[in-house]
Image (cartoon, grey):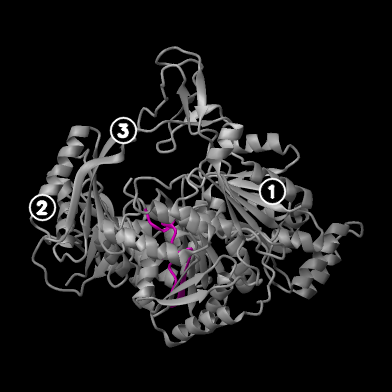
Amino acid sequence: MAELVQVIVDVPTMQTNRPYTYRVPEHLERQVQPGMRVMVPFGRGSREVQGFVVAVDQPGEFDGDLKDLAGVMDLSPVLNDELLKLAGWLADQTYAFKITAFYTMLPSLLKAQTTRLVRLVDEVDEQTRLALFADQDELDLAKVQTDPLALSQLMRLRRAGKVVIDYRVHDRARAKQITTITPTLSFDDYEGERLGVLKNAHAQRNLLDYLQSLAGKTVPLKQAQEESGLSAATFTTGAKRGWLKKGQAEVYRDPSGALPTSPTAPPTLNQEQAQAVKRINQATDQRTAETFLLQGVTGSGKTEVYLRAIERALANGRSALMLVPEISLTPQIVSRVRGRFGKQVAVLHSGLSNGERYDEWRRIKRGEAKVVVGARSAVFAPLDNVGLIIMDEEHESSYKQDDAPRYHARNVAKWRAAYHHAPLVLGSATPSLESRARAATGLYHRLTLLHRVNQRPLPPIQVVDMKREVQARGETNYSLPLLNLLTDRLNKGQQSILMLNRRGFSSFVMCRDCGYVPKCPNCDISLTLHMDSRSLKCHYCGHEERIPNTCPNCQGHRIRYYGTGTEKAVAELQTYLPTARIIRMDVDTTRRKGMHEKLLTKFGNHEADILLGTQMIAKGLDFPGVTLVGVLNADTGLDLPDFRSSERTFDLLAQVAGRAGRADEAGQVVIQTFNPDNYVIQLARAHDYERFFVQEMNLRKLGAYPPYYYTVRVMGSHPDEQMAARVMQAVRQELVGQLDSQTIILGPTPRAIARLKNRYYYQIVIKYRHDPALHARLTAIMEGAQQQFDRETQVMIDPDPQYFL
């Protein structure tokens, strides 16, 4: 009776959520586990493909012709039982394939084309070493992954802790190694060696002294050099004379190593904070999967509430997960969390190198890190026994994944909290309307922090009508009130933050003679001017070209720049304030690894007077020296054809305003707008989230939008526009008459930006309250699209879309 396993295979041209049954070779029986990656023969030609074991069947009789596993890619599971269950739920809820969900949960080193190296880390018998490793210290697993006997031996060695597996990709990312030294002689033997050393050989005598002090302990060579003051050459001499043995040891890369890790003392909580902590800790102690909405004004001390709640989870012997929406927030948050919990903290976000992310993932998987801080994908961190999940700035749209599986981190966090019987804390000064509505109906437990911890009021907000400024002074990014306040802050040695929600130098280039605007050849959008590279770039597909000297359409020479961007805003500000030290922070200046942290550290050290950037500077940053915040263009995004545009604008204005006056000095905010009477601007000026919530909810109800209705976007794309339209018309036909009579189907219509990367996009928007038939119909559409349409067709289903653009 053969042992059988169920495998989800990775076949990009024809994906399926149905597992295939394979037989386990005899030597591997009872060693293959769910969550391992395997190689299997697939199809009539029996080509080898990768797959994930999702179940191991009990041995039984089977009359059919089953194929054997071709090989095992891991010596232990890379996905635990929880993540396997989560992947099944994720694929079902987001209309994705399980194989995509599996890869989403793993670090890049386990997804890329890698060399898998099995390394000896302990002594094994000579016969085994020769048979498997040919007297080497490491073995390429690919060479034996189809050899069941060798795999069986390696699995036993791994369980005994004698081997580990590393992953090396083409950029040579792998487990980091350092050189170590180990004394080989006893204290008395070193005394005997000293007799044979020349009296003037001071370095060798000092080496003998140092080796005696180690008492047989292994230390890194670098540490030994620092402690002894001896050169690497002296240690090499010692190795040749048999006084010490050099070796290799694995160390973790530390992505936050530059951040301060000295312990910090917790401050005294105010009454509001103490009440919130008490309520969350009760749920932690009782192991109840309760969802809390922590609604606190900016500067009210939400982070300290998080830290106290994490402390209780750790005290209960459990782990904690904290999500933040932006990489730019991570350095400051990690600094505070590590200051409280030290090396127990791991960091996961897209700004890490492959090697750093792999090391952090292994620390978490091995249970060496109990607290994880990270952006959206950190919600899949392989933590065991989770006692608390925190989602800071829960309203942020960056928590929603744009590509398959199109998950929202909030929903995944809820699933994991329920699985572990742990509380989920959603924190924000401006909660999403969906979360605030759930709190109003009692689905979430609402906790409020209505006052700033320093007892200072929220900063007054001055709204400047830019129509009058432009009429009086011409086109400009800076009103006189804002320039006067900036000058005042410079004179006082205080700092300012300016937000412009656009990067680059200028929005677009246009010919003043014929109106020609250079557009991307691959996308239906104008190109953005970048003066640092003197080029026009597409921010969607990456196309880049030179700035034209003459108009390609009429050959005219009146090429002019319109709109504004961060580059242009900095250049203009420098003309008004020539002595000001300005840091520009946007996607272009933070593209290089570590630049977020470097720029923020520089600003935090008062090496600059003004921080000017895009919305990445609006959230979570805490700089005591900032007393002025200016919003240069509050109208950006306000009138976009998207039902969430008002909510996003209010959130952004409230968040950036909260960066001012967070310490002893009073703060002030200036919002520049061409629409000063707009209700969003006026309610943001009044810091009145509750009135905004009521007014926006009324508008959502009239428009049949969330949270009154659920929404799904079905989008089809094809290189040929007519084919894209026909595909979506066929999808509509599969829905009409099959759904609840109250369900609304809109479209198909072209997407707002109809062409991207040489593909045309058409979409259908579905709005519903309760429709039992919808999920099954959409699942059938997803699975049937591969057979129904040609290979150039892509059909994407996005539940709860954040944008309809």
Q: Is residue 64 left or right of residue 96?
A: left
What is the number of callouts on the image? 3
Q: Quadrant of the N terminus?
A: bottom left
Task: Give the magenta-colored segment's residue range.
Answer: 380-401
Crowding at label 3, few (<14), some or many (≥20) Cα neighbours within 10 Å?
some
Q: What amino acid is at disc 2?
A: Val
Q: CA distance from mark 1 to mark 2?
A: 59 Å
Q: Nearer the viewer, residue 522 or 349?
A: 522
When asked about the image quadrant of residue 702, the answer is bottom left
Q: What is the number of the mark on residue 485?
A: 1
x then y, percent, for residue 699: 33, 58
Q: Residue at x 65, y 63 (%)?
A: 662
For the residue labelled by badge 3, is the local secondary structure a helix, a strand or a loop? Answer: loop
Q: What amino acid is at disc 3?
A: Asn
Q: What is the number of the mark on residue 758?
A: 3
Is 385 one of the magenta-colored residues?
yes
Q: Is residue 204 left or right of residue 680?
A: right
When asked about the image quadrant of residue 105, the answer is bottom left
Q: What amino acid is at disc 1?
A: Leu
